[in-house]
Amino acid sequence: MTSLEPMTSMEHVERLRQYGVPFRSYLDAGRHLVRLALPGVLVHVPLAALSLLGLMVATGGSAALVNQRFQLIGTSDAPLLIWTLVLAVVALAGEIVVFPATVIIAAGHLVDRHVPPVEALRATVRRLPSLLLLLLVGALAFGAAAAAGAGVLMATDQQWLANAVLVAAAYAAMPGLLAVPGILLHGCSGLDSIRRAYRLTELSFLPTALTLAFGVVLVPGAAAWALESGLRLLPGPLATLGWGMAGTLLALAITPFQAAVVARQFLHCMAWRTEVDDSDLAHGLPAGPPRPVRPGLLPAALLPGLLFSGVVLVNPFGWPEIIETNVTESWQPAERSGSSDNDPELRPIDLRDVHAGRGTGLTMVIDGFEDYASLLACPDASCRKTTFTWAEPPSANTDAAPGAVSARLPDGRLLLTTWSHQALRLLTCEADRCVPTPGGWNPARAYYPAEYTGVALAVRKDGGPVVAFADKERVKGDSSPAKDIVSLIFCADVSCSRLEPRQVARLDASAYLPDVHNLAVAMAPGDRPVVARFDTTSGQIHVISCADAACLQPRVTRPVAPYPPGVNDRLGRETGLALAVRTDGRPMIAYRDMNDRATKLLDCRTPDCAQADVITLDAGGPYRSTPALVLDRAGRPLVAYQNQDGTRLMLATCTGRHCVSTAVARMRGAGDGLAMTMNSRGEPTIAWIDDSGSLLGGEWGLIVTTPLNVVEEDPR
């Protein structure tokens, strides 16, 4: 019997010398997953539950449910940054205890020693100073690697080379993970444990680093990616439950698999050292009597996920509920239309308007500078599927000039303007095609280049179009035009075969820029047109109102006075307005003030806007889109606009002269494009451009956002 003792004492050594560490580690972790997950259940579950409760209560003003997922999109980034830091610190504080304790338990299983989770946690807490020093060294190494990558990028301007530096540094740091069991099992200090870890791997550095990278980083990362991709395929409520339940289980399961790889790799390296027996492998492991796993701990592991999912689904705090779709996230126009050079193109400056289509669909008007207009249509409000077609193909004998404006006809079709040799034409459009109006009549002709001519459309209750047309007066010789002539063209039907043009205003000539928002027209009760004109040189707003449907007695008021000379540095930054008329005939105008760039709402007290109140919605910043304005079913104005720093899409709901603004989306940057309509369910739907700097090679996207409960029913 004595002669057999040396063989028995080498049983674990021989077993742990076997290769295939990642595969064998994952098998061990799968067999003992419940026990290995106990430290995470004991530590992470209470911390996560308390953190989530604090998050939901303390950040209610910034919280929203976007696609039934909790997000912080409030008017400031401060809550997001604070809570990101808080949750990261809490998770790191828990993991600095949980991961080493799980490594101890996994090492115990490999040498047939039972280590109770409480004893493993106690052993970890006793060695916490050394573990914190190890964490500090790791953070400094990460910072040095990031600095090296940034230096390479600045020196070479090659992103792939900088990434290669970061990957090489991360690969070289992998053996440092073996310092964790060195601290716990052999009592090494933080720095000594690092030296010991690299000495253990000096004869097999590359395989060891590859094993740790594969088992600790790559496979868990792939599992998290697969889970996220799979949950995206589920419908809303199931995806919410999936994020809460499966996300919690994955978070608790990843650490056991990572710890099993680190523990086996450490003991594998130990087993190949000379003069090592089983007692050396079991050195430093705390022992305790085996205890069965309490059944109550397993349901407790799901508590944070159940709590979070339940709050998101029930929404007891009344957070804004928002549906958001990135239309261009996985879509390129050329791919959807056969990659032809003659296909329409969507760029970050091309969004012009959005309308509710027939049924539950949407139609967006796309029109670029010196390009032809096109239609981007969605069969439903989610806009996850689209069609993209020319409104005026290049073969249609039209001008590639900007300025396509549109209006919705009573039957759900669109009325769209286009230019042909400086003659204004009308198209009627379904979601996927446009045709010239019957007869091909031209309602107007531009005297100066079409792109500098103001055009706006409105439709009367009987479907007859009203065209607002602004062009400089005709002069002879070298004289400059002295007036900007605004006319209204009344058409009996969409063909405009019988039209009645009427000049309604002679305004001071101005450098009206080629922007479709410089001129707007809307219909007041009794089919009386109301026109608004924005002067881009002075910031003045002209309101032209009509006492009758034929506008025989037009009246011009100027509720926003011109600014004095000296603001030329602001030209072209605030170039438009949006107009709506309430059921009592009083106009509302949303615009950006040229003087301070603030987003404002002009609330007219009278139908001619001779008296008006100015409501400031937000402070201003340069290069923001013109606000969008619609009326809800209760007749209240809704204004969509970009906030002061261009990081939030805001929706203001106004009752009387009181407006409440709510953040409905986070923006990477203030893109050039914003439009809004009321969908078939009476909800505001906003189409907008999210631009992180496309002119400098950054990313951009066309986003459709629909707030579901931001606009409440009018209490009246």
Image: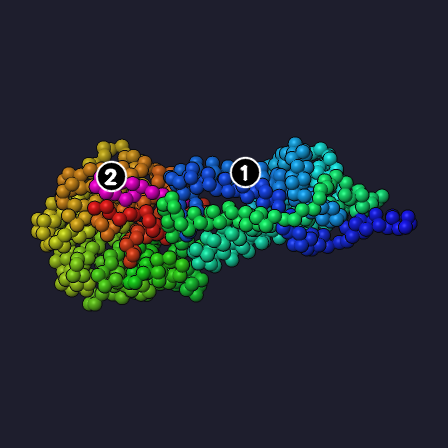
Q: Position of residue 26 (x, y in %)?
A: 67, 53
In the image, residue 706 lies in the stretch drawn in magenta: no
Q: Which residue is mark 1?
A: 90
Q: Main secondary structure of the magenta part?
A: strand
Q: Nearer the viewer, mark 1 or mark 2?
A: 1
Q: Which residue is mark 2?
A: 658
Q: Is residue 557 visible?
A: no
Residue lying at 23% horizontally and 33% vertically, measured from the top left: 564
Residue lying at 24% horizontally and 33% vertically, measured from the top left: 565
- The kind of residue on which mark 2 rests is His
Residue lying at 50% horizontally and 40% vertically, measured from the top left: 50
Q: Earlier in the sequence, mark 1 or mark 2?
A: 1
In the image, residue 661 lies in the stretch drawn in magenta: yes
- Give residue 327's mark: none
Q: Specify few, some or many for label 2: CA neighbours under 10 Å numbering under 14, 14-19, or 20 or more.
A: few
Q: Determine whether, in the image, residue 633 is placed left or right of residue 55.
A: left
Instruction: Find numbered disc 2 in the image and state the secondary structure of the residue it sits on.
Output: strand
Instruction: Find numbered disc 1 in the image and state the secondary structure of the residue it sits on.
Output: helix
Q: Which residues are magenta?
A: 652-666
Q: Position of residue 541 (x, y in %)?
A: 20, 41
Residue lying at 29% horizontally and 47% vertically, measured from the top left: 712
Q: Position of residue 33 (x, y in %)?
A: 64, 51
Q: Is residue 224 above or below residue 491?
A: above
Q: Determine whether, in the image, residue 411 is placed left or right of residue 260.
A: left
Q: Nearer the viewer, residue 357 or 97?
A: 97
Circles 1 and 2: CB atoms closer than 8 Å: no
Measured Cα–Cα span from mark 1 to mark 2: 41 Å
Q: Is residue 64 visible?
A: yes
Q: Specify few, some or many for label 1: CA neighbours under 10 Å numbering under 14, 14-19, or 20 or more.
A: some
Q: Where is residue 382, by image quadrant?
A: bottom left
